[in-house]
Amino acid sequence: MTGQRPLQGMRIGLLTASASRAGAGVFEAVLQQAAMIRALGGEALIFALHDAYSDTDAVRFVPSTVATFPVSGPRQFGYAPGLVKALIDAELDLLHLHGIWMYPSRAATQWRRATKRPYLISAHGMLDPTTVNRRPWKKAIGRIGYEQASWRAADAFHALTKQEAANIRGQVGKARVIVIPNAAPMPNADNLRDMPAPKYLFLGRIHAQKNLRALMSAWRIGAMDRNGGLLIAGWGDPAEEARVRADADYPGSAVRLLGPVHGAEKQALLASARFMVLPSLGEAMPMSILEGWAAGLPAIISTQSNLPEGIAAGAALACETDPASIAAALRQAAAMNDDEWQAMSRAGVALVEGPFSAQTVAAQWARAYRGESLE
């Protein structure tokens, strides 16, 4: 099938551990994938483990259907007795697993063996070295218990970047890997604006991987409290959030923890900030930075954040993950004049209108789902 609806007639299953805000960035990626499949003429059916937010957030997938399944036993594994039968009964043409290291990997393997139909895995950074080496004994059990079988059953892996593709091959060995980036939101005319007040915004999951404690140290090293405010918007690990909150609690602090933000509140934050900040220890591809570029907002990112295109294009300032390097980037950002900032803003908008545009990314996915080469 060709033309504007190349996936017409295809039933594509999107399987993930959490089809709600509990899934953080993976949830947003699955939402985006479902909308793109519909736009290409296909039918997206979502399957996930049930969690505290499943019922509330299911509306975000409309008109796609969402089936969630209660977990039996430890949540960290996520065994859901009804999942495999539901996948098989759905008569899918293709199954796309988002995220690994939990029971959905096992369920996907059983579906593949039963149906002999195409099976694709998006690892979402979960085969990056920093992730694999976190709690290695659990990863070893998962690898032997169910992941190796899932990896062998998959027709292909999906990576967001060339670096992630290399990480996947480093863990899996010989595997077909297709590289397709995340699609950015559509920019609009309001995004090209005067340089805002000096506010710096972190937007995302609060987790040790995001390196926020190093950012806290860098903020104080750079004496940034006199030069603006640092806004931390997101949620995640309660213990890590408590540590970050303690780091931000000192006399004269201009650091604010806002909690989770969505919709109009998030857009208002993006419009009010001068720079996004992400000093991450490792990312597959950070959706928050693409959202920032679409809002005309330049970024400060670690080289480990896996968006070298932004650094090369001048849409982002690069730093390493240590406090001194982050502080140097913050000082560089604070010293920029309006013309310099505007040039960075335009560079980010150009990226989301070009290689990260929804149209470009959708065309690549249409070919991938139809089994065509992306070489």
Image: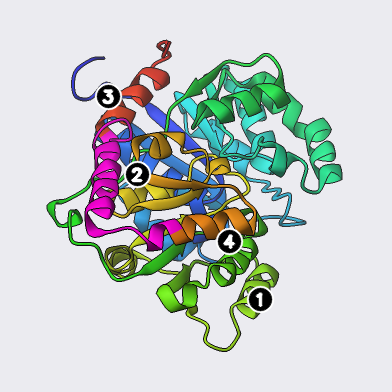
Q: Nearer the viewer, residue 199 or 375?
A: 199
Decide: few, some or many residues near mark 3? Use Cα within 10 Å; few <14, some 14-19, many ≥20. some
Identified by mark 2, the residue type is Ala
In the rendered image, residue 7, in percent from the top left (x then y), is placed at 31, 24
In the rendered image, residue 175, in percent from the top left (x then y), is placed at 63, 16
Q: How is the image coloured?
A: rainbow
Which of the marked residues, 3 or 1, is nearer the chain's N terminus?
A: 3
**CA gap, disc 3 and disc 4:** 32 Å
At 49% from the left and 49% from the top, the residue drawn is 301
Identify the secondary structure beneath mark 1: helix
Identified by mark 1, the residue type is Ala
Judge depth for marks 1 and 4 and give the one in front: 1
Which of the marked residues, 2 or 1, is nearer the chain's N terminus?
A: 1
State the residue position of label 3. Answer: 8
State the residue position of label 4. Answer: 51
Which of the marked residues, 2 or 4, is nearer the chain's N terminus?
A: 4
Q: Which residues are magenta?
A: 332-358
Q: Which mark is residue 242?
A: 1
Q: Nearer the viewer, residue 196 or 7?
A: 196
Which of the marked residues, 3 or 2, is nearer the chain's N terminus?
A: 3
At 50% from the left and 66% from the top, the residue drawn is 234
In the rendered image, residue 210, in percent from the top left (x then y), is placed at 59, 56
**CA gap, disc 1 and disc 4:** 23 Å
Which of the marked residues, 1 or 4, is nearer the chain's N terminus?
A: 4
State the residue position of label 2. Answer: 315
Identified by mark 4, the residue type is Asp
Decide: few, some or many residues near mark 1? Use Cα within 10 Å; few <14, some 14-19, many ≥20. few
Residue 65 visible to an observer of this rendering: no
Where is the C terminus found, in terms of image quarters? top left
